[in-house]
Amino acid sequence: MTDILVPTLGESVSSATIARWLKKAGEAVAADEALVELETDKVTVEVNAPAAGVLEAIVAQEGAEVEPGAVLGTIAAGGAAAAPKPAAPAAAPAAAAPAEPKVEAPRAVTGPVSRPGGGEHAPMPAAAKLMADNKVDAASVGGTGKDGRITKGDVLDFLARPASAAAPAAAAAAPVKQRNLEAGEERVKMTRLRQTIAKRLKEAQNTAAMLTTFNEVDMSAAMALRAEYKDVFEKKHGIKLGFMSFFVKASIAALKEFPAINAEIEGDSVIYKNFIHMGIAVGGPNGLVVPVLKNAQDLSFAGIEKAINGFGKRARDGQLKIDELAGGSFTITNGGIYGSMMSTPILNPPQSGILGMHAIKERAMVVNGKIEIRPMMYVALSYDHRIVDGKEAVSFLVRLKEGIEDPRRLMLDI
């Protein structure tokens, strides 16, 4: 008999929810065949069969929260389908929550922890250890895990909040009373990814002193350069030349000049980075994800275009890996592909800057005293005013504008 285990989920991801089983108990499976989909805060992960045989039992049911190393089910050797075993205790009513010991690592605490609103649900092991290390009372932390259990992310969020916000934390985490639905309404539970997006965006608004500054870019030179060399570029590198590589290169040049926009706040310190891990926001089937171009400052135009093209394809197919979404120091989001003319992008914590690109539109512009029709794009930089001054933010966009309007500057690194 072979156990099906939850794989390592990656940096900062301590648990996942079972989205759906692709096989039923008693069905034959092939080695490396996809068996179950796990939904994390960032992506959907498929767990493949570690060996060929028969799916003997499903231990963790759909909707259960599991941690790395937990047993999801078992595979029996042989090709004949065995009689399906009864469902694991996780299928019992949620109030009893008997299935949790089946799917979690050994507890870091021995006794139950009282939870606000009644009931005694122990925190997840990683959360229990973190609370013990930081002397945090479980009653002050709102649990968002299954049956109200406290996850490691809940504790980290609690520790990140200002002390003044700690007192009402328990009350704020109390479940919202659900109203009766009217005819034509439907209640659908948010996915973990959507919950995380909502949580992080609200966190950015609550913790950062966020401001946005705007500028406009004449795309004539970049469009002319692209039109002149796109065929040669594609023939040599096997990838199309897009505009995103121009903006990545221009952002890198500006970030080198204004490093605070590539930095982050940690407590009462500022962490400056000698690298640029560029997050590129792309739309996936379950919402917006931000894969990261690691060490983008070392990539060529072709390297940037190939990486972004790969991100987009894997995002559409739901195949992005956890480590591809972690560690960004600055983000670019392009609402222009959806037709956006202007927007104020929200920071991706703990980053201190995010660039918003928009649609290219022909507009009447005054050039050397004459009115000309030029392809123009509005750009926006949202920044954390706690460490980035307005002068730096405005100057950043000016440098970016200069690089896009005269791409030779990007080639010569000036």
Image (tube, helix red, strand yellow):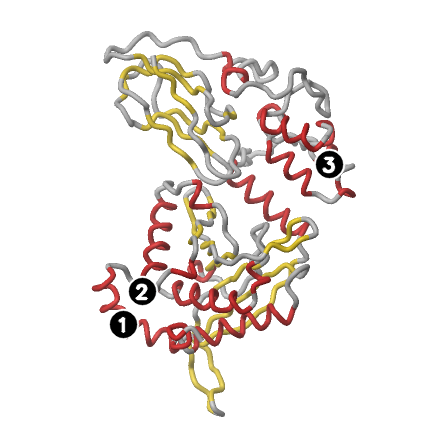
Which residue is at a point 52% across and 62% down the rendered structure image? Answer: 355
The residue sitting at the bottom extreme is 369
Q: Is residue 17 left or right of residue 346?
A: left
Q: Determine which residue is flagged by label 1.
A: 229
**Element at badge 2?**
loop
Between the residue at mark 3 and the residue at mark 1, the CA separation in whole angstroms equals: 57 Å
**Nearer-N-terminus badge (3/1):** 3
Q: From the viewer's side, name the closer residue of 343 and 104.
A: 104
Neighbourhood count class around disc 1 (C-alpha, 10 Å): few under 14, some 14–19, many 20 upward: few
Q: From the viewer's side, name the closer residue of 50 and 297.
A: 297
Q: Is residue 321 left or right of residue 274?
A: left
Which residue is at a point 32% across and 23% down the rendered structure image? Answer: 50
Percent x, y of residue 268: 70, 52
> Disc 2 residue type?
Leu
Q: Label 1 near label 2: C-beta < 8 Å?
A: yes
Which residue is at a point 38% across and 32% down the rendered structure image? Answer: 46
